[in-house]
Amino acid sequence: MLARMLFQSWKHGIKRKLLAVITIFLASGLVSALLAVSIDIGDKMSKELKSYGANILIEPASSAILPEVSSINSSLATQDFIDEKELPNIKDIFWRNNIVGFAPQLSANVQVNGENISILGTFFDHPIAVPDEDDYHTGQKIISPYWKVTGEWVDDSQEQYAVPVPALLGEQLAKSMKWKIGDRVTIHYQTQDIQNQLEVEIKGTVSTGGNEENQLILPLSAVQNLLNLEGKVQSIKVSALTVPENELSRKARANVDQLDAEEYDRWYCTAYVSSISHQLEEAISGVVVRPIWQVAASEGVVIEKIQLLLAVVTVAALIAAAMGIASLMTTNIIERSKEIGLMKALGAYQWQITLLFYCEAIISGIFGGILGCLAGWGLAKFIGATLFGVPLDFAWIVVPCVLVLAIIIALVGTWFPAHRIAKLYPVEMLYGR
């Protein structure tokens, strides 16, 4: 009997039902797209925010207990170094797949035509052997996408370089020394025990907004040979995909030892910048690993605010849809008031009448929710392609969530008019009162 009544209701009131389905479809489409974006936006935004640069710095352990002194201004003979052989260990931690890239650094003061300048040895796009990954490349091109290079990037795919060695020139240093792309200069490094020189050719200029603008930037191996520091680096910048901080990560940041066993496992197995730093410190001997909190904190704040904005828009869409359904159902029920009065006069109970309207609402919610999921999938792909250049992944957990929300929207919109009309007396409805 209920099935027959539902069929007749849809058959004779198809326009009203379609309006309800369209309303739910629009809300469901928006909600499913926003949910898909919210789920995947953390990783996508984290990758986008890598333009801020590396968010982890690895230094020799002595830097944690000695006063902070610029490595350029202090004697290399008094410094501790990190063994370059430790570099593959960066990709040998639990969160190895979250390591976007890294770049070792070695800097010193040298002389050119009697003037002191600073040089920096690093990776640009250098191949390095890491466990279970063939043809792995890393360097400044990967972790420092904000570097603006005019001319050519240095090709450091080889360990040995023919003279002259290719180099990038910081823009500020180029202005002060009046050097330009294509110039060749000879740099001299001299101490009591070492007297070396190296001819370099400027392949391009670089603008970074940092100290690199006042440096001559060369391949790491060339600087190591010049300084007689083969296989040594002063620091390593690491770029890692992380999740925003919460109370647990802040507690661990203050003191890891105060975490109980359950908290420690949860913290260790979550991609917080502090937990990744802790694992890097375990993997590399004789170092201290410090998160660069300005970068890490900005990533977390931006992602949290975007997710909050998405949540507000989702709630607003749900409320608007529920109000639209309530308006449609009120009009629909008023038009069917004589039908309802006749049902009550024939002995129908209040719950039977409300059940009829609830079933109609559920059917509308299912149809609208399914269509909305399809539309949301397409909208999420479009948003991803427009904002990030690649489509967002549509998590299938969104489908049951959206269907449930669509049904809830329909039921909430139906509740008030259905209960209101069901409480009236049959004579009032039959006489149109």
Image (cartoon, grey):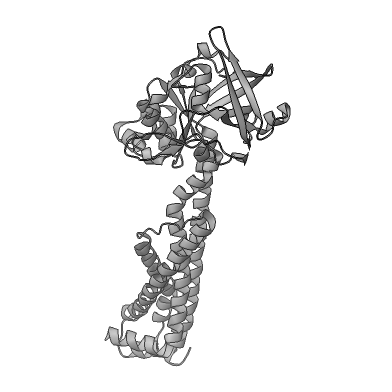
Quadrant in the rendering for residue 352: bottom left
Residue 184: image location, x then y, percent: 64, 28
Quarter of the N terminus within the rendering: bottom left
Residue lying furthest bottom:
431
Residue lying furthest front:
162
Residue lying furthest left:
1
Residue at x-position 67% and y-position 33% = 171
Q: Please, is residue 136 above or below residue 20 in the view?
A: above
Q: Please, is residue 113 above or below residue 209 in the view?
A: above
Pick the front one: 401 or 215: 215
Residue 214: image location, x then y, percent: 65, 28
Residue 411 visible to the viewer: no
In the figure, is residue 30 to the left or right of 115?
left
In the figure, is residue 200 to the left or right of 319?
right
Residue at x-position 42% and y-position 92% = 430
Residue at x-position 46% and y-position 87% = 335
Q: Please, is residue 399 above or below residue 53 in the view?
A: below
Residue 262: image location, x then y, percent: 30, 35
Residue 219 visible to the viewer: yes
Residue 108: image location, x then y, percent: 57, 20
Pick the front one: 220 or 5: 220
Quadrant in the rendering for residue 150: top right
Q: Please, is residue 240 above or below residue 188 in the view?
A: below
Pick the front one: 157 or 356: 157
